[in-house]
Image: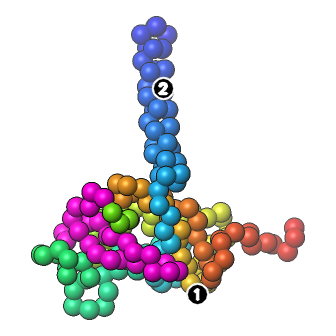
Amino acid sequence: MSLRFKLAFWGIVAAQLVVLLAMIGVKEATLQTGTTVTLQTVPVDPRSLFQGDYAILRYEIGEAGEGDSPPWDAYIPGGLDVGQEVYVTLRDDGEVWVADGYGLERAEAGPVAIRGRLTADGWLDFGIDTFFVPEGTGWAIEQAEDVKVRAAVDAEGDAVIKGVLVDGQPFEPARETDGGR
């Protein structure tokens, strides 16, 4: 193996490691410095709730609703196109944070705002729409009557899940057992 090949190989490995550590660092910074909000989820069809070992989460603040037009249409003339970025201004309503407004740009200062994108199925995706669970533990979320998500939201509107509350209690997965074998 030539010296040039070895240097190129280790350079590529180092670059991948730097990118991975940077991604982790950004998420960790959001967890440490972001504003913690609690968001209400909405029910998702249990037949499609789990695909593998994660739960699909949808949020009231990103719901298109049952009416003629989604709530963001009142704030954004002409509505949103699929894939378009939107900021949801949040207001603490006691137990959960609720949508207080929608906009195409983040306010420079002031209230907490979470960034999302409109999906093809009409929901706003905030990047926290999947929650990974240990294998065999998802039944607790699937059967819950009330699921809330605690998330950290940074100044740019990016969010990271800090925890999940299932029927008012922190989600602490208990594996299904096979009779103690």
C-alpha distance separating marks 1 and 2? 46 Å
In the rendered view of the protein, which quadrant contains the C terminus? Answer: bottom right
> What residue appears at the point 43 percent right and 60 percent down from the top-left corner?
153
Residue shown at 48% from the left, 14% from the top: 6
Is 34 colored magenta in this rendering?
A: no
- Compared with 73, 160 (above or below) is above
Label 2: which residue?
A: 14
Which numbered marker is on residue 145? Answer: 1
Asked whether the beta carbons under mark 1 and mark 2 sit within 8 Å of each other, the answer is no
Give the residue furthest to the bottom.
67
Query: Comparing marks 1 and 2, which lies closer to the viewer?
Result: 1
Whether residue 141 is visible here, answered yes or no, is: yes
Q: Is residue 86 magenta?
A: yes
- Quadrant in the picture for residue 157: bottom left
Q: Residue at x 38, y 65 (%)?
A: 112
Give me the disc on residue 37.
none
Task: Give the residue drawn at x 19%, y 71%.
Answer: 80
Q: Is residue 83 visible?
A: no
Identify which amino acid the numbered label 2 is placed on. Answer: Ala
Residue toward you, 51 or 34:
34
Observer-nearest residue: 57 or 136?
A: 57
Residue type at mark 1 is Glu
**Image x and y of residue 158, in percent:** 39, 57
Lower sequence index among marks 1 and 2:
2
Relative height, residue 37 to residue 10 (above, below): below
Tell me which segment is drawn in magenta. Answer: 80-109
Residue placed furthest toward the left: 78
Specify whether 180 is left or right of 5. Answer: right
